[in-house]
Amino acid sequence: MSAAIQVHLIDDDEAVLESLGDYLESQGLLVERYARADDAVSKLGGDPAETCIVSDVRMPVMSGLDLQKLLAEQGSTVPLILMNCRSRPTCSSIRSAVSLPSHRFTVAEMMVATSFP
């Protein structure tokens, strides 16, 4: 039996943090919730095969982009998913800032995509 995936969920919006965290837990994932990226930094290690970080982009003190930059500087290979509820132009600026492709999706699409058998 494989270990459950550890998700570090970071969002300054308490409603998003709780509802998304509850959903991910209902799918069998272990979820640690953080309201601020700078509070989570010291706890974000782990095996990249068993750990994932899901972070909001726009947060006070340390943004999701700042977090991505810090993790890259530390040589982290833990997967990072940046969430953003803004329009497409913001996604383009994020894509160019982190040199990664972006994918626009709805919450319904994400729920279907993350449903486990």
Image (cartoon, grey):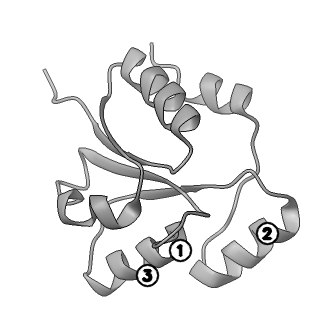
**Mark linked to residue 90:** 2
Give how far apart the Cα atoms at labels 2 and 3 are. 18 Å
Give how far apart the Cα atoms at labels 3 and 1 are. 6 Å
Question: Label 1's element?
Answer: helix
Mark 3, residue position: 69
Q: Quadrant of the C terminus?
A: top left
78 relative to 97, above or below: above
Q: Nearer the viewer, residue 40 or 103?
A: 40
Point out residue 76 in the picture as x, y percentages from the top left corner: 27, 72
Give how far apart the Cα atoms at labels 1 and 2 are. 12 Å
56 relative to 113, above or below: below
Amino acid type at circle 2 is Thr
Question: Label 2's element?
Answer: helix
Q: Nearer the viewer, residue 113 or 35?
A: 35
Dot 2, crowdedness within 10 Å: few (<14), some or many (≥20)?
A: few
Dot 1, crowdedness within 10 Å: few (<14), some or many (≥20)?
A: some
Point out residue 19 in the picture as x, y percentages from the top left corner: 53, 26
Amino acid type at circle 3 is Lys
**Mark linked to residue 65:** 1
Point out residue 15 in the picture as x, y percentages from the top left corner: 57, 32
Q: Are marks 3 and 1 in contact (CB under 8 Å)?
A: yes
**Sequence order check, earlier mark of 1 and 2:** 1
Q: Are marks 2 and 3 in contact (CB under 8 Å)?
A: no
